[in-house]
Image (cartoon, rainbow, N blue to C red):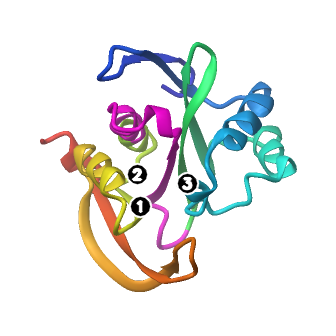
Amino acid sequence: MKDVAKEGKLKNGTKVTLRPMVKEDADALVNFFKSLPDELLLFVRHNVRDESIVRSWAANLDYQRVFPLLALVENKIVADVTLHRVPFGWKRHLGKVRIVVSPEYQKLGLATLMLNEIVDLASEFGLEKLWAEVPLDSRGAISAFKNAGFSCKAVIEDLIKDKEGRNADILIMICDVSAHYDR
């Protein structure tokens, strides 16, 4: 997968292409994040409304540190999943997964499709476990992670703030990469 695009089909029959991000995706990625509603961006770790941040990701790609996988429909980015790795130390066998799917492509199986691809990549990279943090009230995201072999490991109460500034709970989900293939 590292060098090649893959085709997939969503529940509604829409064809989607999954491929690694390249430097030339900067403009399309900026447009993708601009198109997302503010409430969805609350859970993104960076200010993706700042074009310079998004452009720096494309300009400074380091697949050994962060592997960004894009989903495209008719050459338009509709989702982004990233696999974050630590090259040394006590977490070198772990990968952290983050995903953002455009609202019009949610509930169509795209997140599960992308997460399954990330689990495959994690296996290629020699990772043993994947980690994801999901707001406890994000049922769709939890379902997508479960469908891709992640299980719920912990709930941390009042760790995050919702858009109104109220405390909210976060769910820690883990995927045992080798067990993924035994399902």
Judge the density around disc 2: few (<14), some (14-19), many (≥20) Cα neighbours within 10 Å.
many
Extreme residue toward the right, this view: 52
Extreme residue toward the front, this view: 164
Q: Residue at x 34, y 66 (%)?
A: 137
Mark 2 lies on residue: 127
- Which sits in the foreground, 27 or 19? 27
Say whether residue 96 is magenta. Answer: yes
The residue type indicated by label 1 comes to: Ala
The reply, left or right, for residue 14 in relation to residue 31 is left
Task: Name the quadrant containing residue 151.
Answer: bottom left
Camera-near label (3 vs 1) is: 3
Q: Residue at x 49, y 63 (%)?
A: 92
Q: Which residues are magenta?
A: 89-118
Q: Residue at x 71, y 29 (%)?
A: 22
Local SS, label 3: helix
| Mark with earlier residue (1, 2) | 2
Mark 3 lies on residue: 40
| Mark with earlier residue (3, 2) | 3
Mark 1 lies on residue: 132
